[in-house]
Amino acid sequence: MNLGRARMILIVAFFGLNLFLAYHLFWPGTGKLSREAVTPEQVRYVREQLEQVNIQLEAAVDRTVPRSSFLIVFPGEERVEAMNKPLIKAGDKVGESELITAAEQYLRRNNLLPRQAYFDYVEYIDEETMILNYYHIFQNKPLYSSYLRVTLEKERIVALEKHWLNPQGWSSNQENKVIPATEALLRLAEEMRSNDRPRKVTGIDFGYYSREFDAEQWEVPPVWRIVVDGSECYYVNAFTGNLEIDLQRNGI
Amino acid sequence: MKEKVQSLVLILLVLSSLYLTYLLWYARVPYEVATQEEYERVYFEEPRPAGRVIAPEKIVFPGQRTNRVLKEGQPGFQEVWGKILEQLEKGVLKGGIVSENRLPRGSLLLQLHFEPPFPIGSGTTAMPERPYRELAGLEIWERGELLELVLKAVEGGEERGLFLEEGGAQQLQELLEKLSPDSMLPYREFQGEELTALVDFPIQVEEPLWIPLLESVPALEIAVEEPEHERLVKIFFTRYNLVRRIDERDGATIYTDGERGLRIGRERLEYSAPLLEHSFSATDSYPAALNQANRLLCYYSGWPAGLRLVGLDLVSGEGGRNSLCRCQWRFYAGGLPLLYGENGWTVEMAFNDGGLIYLNRHLFQPRKAAEEEIVVAPFSQALKKAFKEYQEQGAEEEGPAYLEAVELAYLVDFADSAYRGQPVWVVRINGREMILDGKSLHLLEGGAR
């Protein structure tokens, strides 16, 4: 290959790279790599703050700062049902993942697992009992207030709890900036300042959450969901930075 | 030459890609700057002048046997109170200008009863040059051509020897002359023995009881305010674009930012910010609490004519500090209070130094008194009926029956697709309140509380 040809290839390659970088820097609404992304220093600072309250940050921190608006939902399906459905033949031994697959196959066959359900985590109650948690995905965004919980005991499905909302779309109000994930983590550190045992942040994700209301319709705010020790969830309102509280319990 | 240009372009592209990578990695608009947004400050109205926060519970014009009374919501009430307040705020009261002995003994022109107390003296706008005190009452005596003020403090005792300035005294006299006694409410003070004789039941009163002697009251139309949701949201939430909406099944709408909530129903609105209660303390100063109540009511709810502050309590919390201040307001129409809700207040509020914790405002307002007059049963019959109920409830076993209040009022009632004020007798014995239909004297549903 002659030098001139190599130079041309490099020019084309770097031109392409420049276009790619400029697109992510300056193109409005790209979202992924916006100019307001969180810096590595900020992540480091948050990590130190959490460590001061005995919390290790093990989850990857989303460094983007998206924009969002409220999600409008209507009440959907409410179902709490006791069941007794064996998932495997008596005497067979299977691992956890096979058991989950068998449970999901059964639920799908019986139209109990909606297509929009996304597997979240397993909650262990005791050696023989575990709960499979699913949440609702609407337009690629998690709606944590809409969920399905399936209780397995000794390779059987013994209970199903479905609280499935009917999301309609986004509020027509203008989109607002949301707080970065680091700010939500700082809010958690503040909330858990009296924590005295070692804990871990195992997940921090962007989604939508509010408690349920006895209403015809309501707006659900965007939240940062922070998962501590695998199954304890905190929801920080991504607009206000307030921890989402149970308004009814607090007298509102 | 061509090779040199290619090399230069390549170097520029490499450098620019490095710079863009740096920008992408490190450079960002500070978040605080990015989120700075401007919000318009929306509120109902400016606070009232400090002296106008408290209005007298009643202004009494003494008579031979029956007294004439002016109350909130009656023509002339605000004018008389305004003129007296003006004199108190001018601070030109003369003391010791004449020898007390040379003046005639004089006669009582009028009495003002305050509930809650009216603060005067240092730190207030009324007689600020004098020491601070809280008044339960104020009397004006005619002594020759002069008008003497008698201040009655909450803790007891009275102060004499203060005179209205001549010009002010004359203006007040002229105003009083214009008032027609017929437009005032007839009231009498009763002792326990008189009341015992009336109902044939041993009644005790802690102090003489003021009871209205009305035979009829005007029919009253009630209007329901149509709440402007958008404006209310902007008033209660500074960052109103971050407030979400919940449409309840009963037609009410809740707005919340997750920590505070505003519920707008058909007949009332409620606001609550419960987290504030434990995060801040409340003032110890009564005048400061009045000022804050005034400011919050005017900003968040408005203070229309006819609405009177009827209660203010400082609630103590942990560590000997006050945790919050509670206040109540009531509408008056033609001098009679309007009752609705669980406890009859038009507006209830709680606040501390952190701001408004709770507001409950009914959306009813007296519209106008119709021509029609509704005859009401005499108070003696209402009293008999109330004591009969009291006995039937077995309450007499609780001990001596202290009669605390006998009041005529309007109860908001919904009938024939319209709200109206239903005249009622309200009798309170040992803290037990009974609401009786003004005409039939039937105990109204939920009327005993």
Image (tube, grey):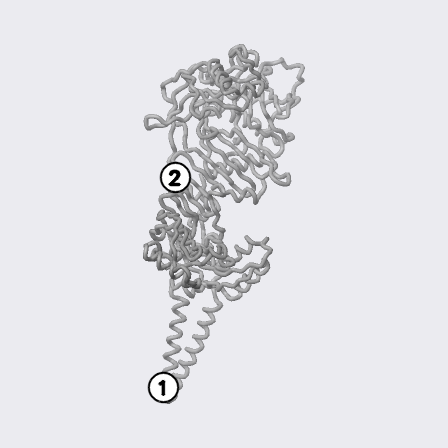
- In the image, farthest residue toward the front: A91
User: Local crowd at mark 1 within 10 Å, few (<14), some, or many (≥20)?
Assistant: few
Residue B306 drawn at (x, y percent): 45, 28
Residue B264 drawn at (x, y percent): 41, 39
Q: Quadrant of residue B353?
A: top right
Mark nearer the viewer, 1 or 2? 2
Residue A34 drawn at (x, y percent): 43, 64
Both labels 1 and 2 in a single chain: no
Q: Is residue B384 left or right of residue B221?
A: right
Q: Is residue B208 left or right of residue B102?
A: left
Q: Chain of mark 1?
A: A
Residue under label 2: B252
Q: At numbered mark 1, what does the secondary structure look like: helix, strand or loop?
A: helix
Q: From what the image shows, is residue B3 above or below residue A35? A: below
What amino acid is labelled 2 in the image? Ala
Residue under label 1: A5
Q: CA distance from mark 1 to mark 2?
A: 73 Å
**Image quadrant where one finds the N terminus of chain B:** bottom left
Residue B445 drawn at (x, y percent): 42, 24
Q: At numbered mark 2, what does the secondary structure look like: helix, strand or loop?
A: loop
Q: Chain of mark 2?
A: B
Task: Determine the residue positioned at 49% across, 26% down.
Answer: B449
What amino acid is labelled 1 in the image? Arg
Closest to the observer: B264 or B80? B264
Q: Is residue B211 left or right of residue A161?
A: right
Q: From what the image shows, is residue A5 above or below residue B187? A: below
